[in-house]
Image (cartoon, coloured by chain):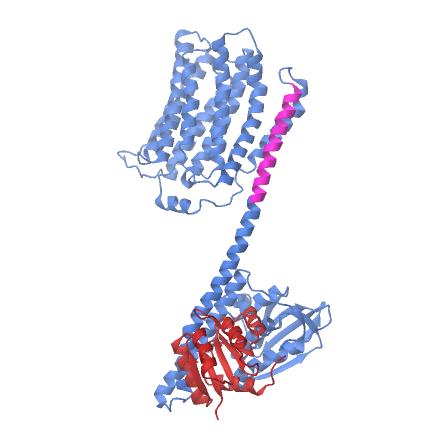
Amino acid sequence: MPSVRLTQNAVASFHRALCPANSRSAAKAPRLTDYRRATVALGVFLLVYVSWQLLGWLPGARQSVGDLLVLPVDVAATSAAWWASRRFARSDRLGSFWRWIAFALAAEMIGDVVQAIYDVGLHHSPYPSMADPFYLAFYPLVLFALLRVPAAALGSDKRTKTSLDAATIVVGGGAVVWYLVLGPTALEGGRGVLAMAVSLAFPVGDLLLLAALAVVLLRHSPIILRAPLRLITIALALGIVADVLYGDGQLHGTYTSGDFIDTLYVLEFSAFALAGARQAPPDYEDAVSAAQRPQQLSARASWLPYLSVAIGLALLLGVERRDPFFPDVSLVLIVIVLAVLVAVRQYIAQRELLRTQAALRHSEQVKDEFLSVVGHELRTPLTSIHGSLGLLAGGVLGELPEDAANMVAVALLNTERLGRLVNDILDIERMATGSLVLEPAAVDASELVEQSIQVVQATAGAAGVTLRSDTAALTVRADADRIVQALVNLLGNAVKFSPRSGVVTLTVSRCDGGALFSVHDSGRGIPADRLEAIFERFRQVDASDAREKGGTGLGLPIARGIVQQHNGRMWAESRVGEGSTLYFTLPLASEPRKPARK
Amino acid sequence: MSPRVLLVDDAQDIRLIAQMSLERVGGWTVMPASSGEQALRAAAEEGPFDAVLLDVMMPGIDGPSTLQQLRAHGLPVEVKIVFLTAKAQAADLKRLRALGAASVIAKPFDPLALPHQLAELLDKPPDS
């Protein structure tokens, strides 16, 4: 029989995939190729199984073949879960999780064997039978396994939210199970108490699993369990659908082994087998990174409760035409309960959001305060160094020998640079944390130009660079101190990159309802692919510029940050060899100008 | 007679540097004090002064409180008070001016320029 040989191949391949020869190492990783090989083996088996179902091969032995074909998947799933458990230390909760999953799958396998003995050996299959206790044992065992999944500690709000979500999912799922199986079974007379109890036990078990699974999915499970857990979720979903159909079949007496419903069970166990094969061994780094982000916000699975509401509503639409055991009013109640659950959850989420916002505001204040203190602490020693060196260099304490004077001059220059760097870094940090507060007012563009040129004049003179300005009569809305800072950075930059006897031109003109500032230099220019990079932190066009030109590497990013906070734009245009122009825009003031603060 | 300035800073280094700068570059007479308390005592016992140079962050009575107490203890308004601060955010400067300081000098200050900055202030008529 070709299918049997294929089955054996599949099982053998699975064992090769899962039990590397002579390796009992608990930390042995399943290689991806092994996982792929297992998937292929399973795929081939499923193809055979589905073909058998669809094409109706061996019609005379449908029941027996159906019983027997389930067994290899049982074995694959059970051994995969068992081998997954072996990848962890005995005390590891994940190892324990897989062990209980393996026990559950083994129980199901024994149930299938017993069922096969009834069908194939005894040609008589009662309901309920000795197979049912094993089938039923599956539920508490999987439930127990799911409870072993470790999760990050949850705050009380999160716990409430998770409970609400789980409740919503269970109510929605419960409605379906009740509507299709539980209700009809409970209301149907004429069967033994035992048969009825067993029939009810399956859907109840499914509901419990649904609840446990919802909790596991909504909490943050360990990263290494994510991929297997996705497969287990698929498996359990298939199982629940199969159980509902199976219950419906039992109710109407239409189910026998080998029914098409069995395909769902085969798929369920295939998913379990893949999950086991997919389980990676514990990885220390994963565990650490998982532990470090327990409260990470996530939209994952947050749609699940809404799916339940949708199911409730869909049932409400479809129920009219069905049996009387499920009156409309109970469905309306279910939908109301679902809506209330989701509403409460929404309220909690909203409250949490507000609290997070408040905490964020507080942390911004703390950060601002911290930056202020850091600035103070850095400037205090700088004051002493700068002061001492300044007095020495100024000859206040007597003339220094030439070499000493040179050394002191170098030290003084670098102290000044360090001071600028401290200021610039603090400014950049303030911008990054959003704690740079502007005080915009109406101010004449010419005043801004005048003040900034005044600051840069001495440096320009020393470098032999001429500063020119051409300013239109415009009133802009700006924080004068900050815009002067930005202009000084641009002008300082232009002077630094101008050749001796070069000219730097600052112009202000009106454009598109705003003011356009431009600083043009006749320096070496900026390559086209670096026009944006110059606005990044510590990204001078040439790495040696930082040393030679004495810049902090933060001047342009700060200037752009200031302009952007004014709702303006800053960009650069350049031709290599002919110089560069940096532009920025500022909004015009709509109100009349107030006298500028000096 | 050279102008007299009361210099208040808890950091010994900075007192030393500022004193040297004011005395040797500017020709001032400097009376150093290492705390707000000492400054109040000096103002009472060793006055009169032409100006007070006042650190902002000090243990005990801080700069702004020292300013208020100096004025409360009868330091005449003609005596200009200048803050020295390592917190040079615009908001800080504004707050300090609002307290009635004639000026705020940011640290690190230039020891060669400090006496001139102070002298310029003394020549200016008092603010409103």
Res A453 quadrant in image: bottom right
Residue at 64% over, 68% down: A440
Image check: A83 left or right of A370?
left
| The C terminus of chain B: image quadrant | bottom right
Does A535 appear above or below A18? below
Of all residues, the one furthest to the bottom in this rendering is B1
| Chain seen in blue | A
In the foreground, A499 or A367: A367
Does A580 appear above or below A225? below
Magenta residue span: A327-351
Instruction: Give the x, y percent position of residue A445.
Output: 67, 75
Q: Tell me, what hue is chain B?
A: red
In the foreground, A588 or A279: A588
Magenta highlight on residue A343:
yes
Kindly report the secondary structure that dominates the magenta region of the rendered protein: helix
In the foreground, A274 or A558: A558
Instruction: Give the x, y percent position of residue A423.
Output: 49, 71
Count all numbered tags in the image, as a single digit.
0
The answer to whether one can see residue A541 in this image is: no
Instruction: Give the x, y percent position of residue A190.
Output: 55, 6
The answer to whether one can see residue B66 in this image is: yes
Instruction: Give the x, y percent position of residue B19.
Output: 42, 83
Residue at 51% over, 24% down: A207
